[in-house]
C-alpha cells in the first residue's frame, strides 16, 4: 500500500522501483486526513478520494483473505485425507 501519494508520478515511481511488490492500493495525501485525526474522527469521514481508496484496499484484503482461507481449507483437507490413508 502506498501512502501520502500526491500525484501520479509518485505512484509510478513506487510501482517502478518495487517491481515485485503487489500493491493493494494507494492512499492519497489529503490534509483532510490530518484534520480528521486531530478532531478524533475516522479518516473515512475525511474525504471522498480517501474513502474510495480505503474501500478498494479493504476489498482487496478481504479477497486475499478469502483466497488464502480456501487454500488453507484445501490443504487441511488433503492433509486429513493423507493422514487417514492406509497407503503408508
Image (spheres, helix red, strand yellow):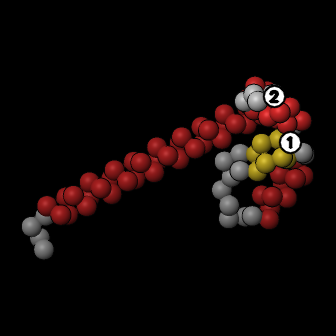
Specify the farthest residue to the left.
86
| Residue designated by label 2 | 39
Q: Residue at x 71, y 50 (%)?
A: 1
Count of labels shown?
2
Mark nearer the N terminus (2 vs 1): 1
Q: Secondary structure at mark 1?
A: loop
Quick check: 3 above or below 83? Answer: above
Q: Seen in the image, is 3 located left or right of residue 75?
A: right
Specify the farthest residue to the bottom.
88
In three-dimensional space, the C-alpha distance between marks 2 and 1, rounded to whole angstroms, equals 18 Å
Residue 9, given in percent of the width and then of the height, sits at 90, 52
Residue 76, given in percent of the width and then of the height, sits at 30, 56
Q: Seen in the image, is 72 located left or right of residue 51?
A: left
Q: Quadrant of residue 12?
A: bottom right
Please tell me how crowded label 1 is: few (under 14), some (14-19), or many (20+) other residues with Cα within 10 Å.
Answer: some
Comparing 88 with 38, the one in front is 38
Q: Residue at x 75, y 28 (%)?
A: 41
State whether residue 81 appears in this view.
yes
Kindly check if marks 2 and 1 are in contact, taking CB atoms under 8 A apart as contact: no
Residue 10, given in percent of the width and then of the height, sits at 87, 53
Label of residue 29 in the image: 1
Q: Secondary structure at mark 2?
A: loop
Comparing 38 with 20, the one in front is 38
Please tell me how crowded label 2 is: few (under 14), some (14-19), or many (20+) other residues with Cα within 10 Å.
Answer: few
Q: Residue at x 13, y 74 (%)?
A: 88
State whether residue 49 appears in this view.
no
Q: Residue at x 46, y 47 (%)?
A: 67
Disc nearest the viewer among 2 and 1: 2
Q: Seen in the image, is 11 located left or right of residue 23?
A: right
Label of residue 78 in the image: none
Residue 28, given in percent of the width and then of the height, sits at 82, 41
Amino acid at each position: 500500500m502506498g501512502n501520502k501519494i500526491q500525484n501520479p508520478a509518485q505512484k509510478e515511481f513506487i510501482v517502478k522501483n518495487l517491481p515485485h511488490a503487489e500493491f493493494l492500493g494507494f492512499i492519497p495525501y489529503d490534509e483532510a486526513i490530518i484534520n480528521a485525526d486531530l478532531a478524533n474522527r475516522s479518516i473515512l469521514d475525511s474525504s471522498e478520494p480517501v474513502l474510495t481508496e480505503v474501500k478498494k484496499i479493504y476489498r482487496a484484503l478481504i479477497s486475499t483473505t478469502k483466497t488464502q482461507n480456501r487454500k488453507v481449507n484445501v490443504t487441511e483437507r488433503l492433509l486429513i485425507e493423507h493422514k487417514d490413508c492406509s497407503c503408508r
